[in-house]
Amino acid sequence: MAVWQYLLIVVPEDSIDDNYQCIFKNNKTKYLPKTDSFWKSFNGDIPSIIAELDQIIPNSKWDDDTFLSWKGNMKDDEDNDATIVLNDDKTSIKEFQFRIDLRKSSNITEVLQAILNLCKKHNFVLIDLKGEIFKPNLEDIFKSIKASNATNFLIDPIQFFEDLSKNNSDETRT
């Protein structure tokens, strides 16, 4: 993940109550928890979701039958990407996430907005790296975007790395 990318995890809205506390709030690791249990009861139109993503971000051609990926043009500051992981028989989603390149405003106004529209259509919600849940509305996630590492890096890269270095040295002392 590039430092200028803002990551959101996509899950079905109706699965949040049953799984959220257990998966995100109790996660004590530095890694994102697996989200496959959020998708257990999802019976939406997976081919439609894939076709819609194909219209938003180019397919990366790196994928296989169960690991699908999309990747924007990195040379044009469009380092947007998305990933959907399917189960072995390709009948259900195990994970779905995307990252938006914050270096260019059109990535937010066009790419992010298009993905949010897809999420609204399929009744998905979004979870950021801190475990906060958002409806797929740009206004709802702006606070998270503004507080993200990606935004902090873009505002002041030197300060971002100084803070990162300070935090790492503080962690090694404890």
Image: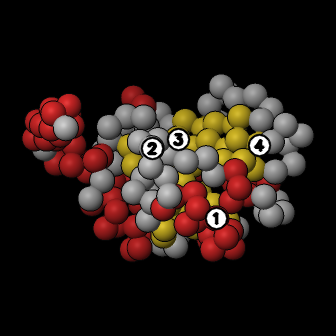
Q: Please tell me which residue is depicted at 69% across the width and 50% down the height of the picture.
A: 36
Tag 1 secondary structure: helix
| Dot placed on the residue nearer the N-terminal end, 2 or 1 | 1
| Residue 100 visible here | no
Residue 81 marker: 3
Q: Secondary structure at mark 3?
A: strand
Given contact means CB atoms under 8 Å apart, are the residues at marks 3 and 2 in contact? no
Give the residue furthest to the front. Answer: 174
Name the residue that disc number 2 marks: 29
Looking at the image, do the residues carrying marks 3 and 4 touch, with CB atoms under 8 Å apart?
no
Please tell me whether mark 1 or mark 3 is closer to you in this view. 1
Q: Earlier in the sequence, mark 1 or mark 4?
A: 1
Q: Nearer the N terminus, badge 3 or badge 2?
A: 2
Question: Whole-percent x and y of residue 76?
Answer: 38, 34
Q: Residue 69's spot in the image, x, y percent?
A: 64, 36
Q: Specify which label sits upstream in the sequence, 3 or 4.
A: 3
The kind of secondary structure element at disc 2 is loop
Nearer the observer: mark 3 or 2; the answer is: 2
Q: Amino acid at mark 4?
A: Leu
Q: Position of residue 160 (x, y in %)?
A: 16, 41
Q: Residues within 10 Å of mark 1 (few under 14, many from 20)?
A: some
* Residue 86 circle label: 4
Which residue is denoted by mark 1 in the rendering?
A: 19
Check disc 2 and give the amino acid type.
Thr
Q: Is the C terminus in the top left, top right, bottom left or bottom right quadrant?
A: top left
User: Are the residues tagged 2 and 1 within 8 Å (C-beta)?
Assistant: no
Disc on the earlier residue, 4 or 2: 2
Measured in 3D between alpha carbons, the distance from the residue under mark 1 to the one under mark 4, in whole angstroms, is 19 Å
Question: In percent of the image, x 89 and y 40: which residue is there?
Answer: 89
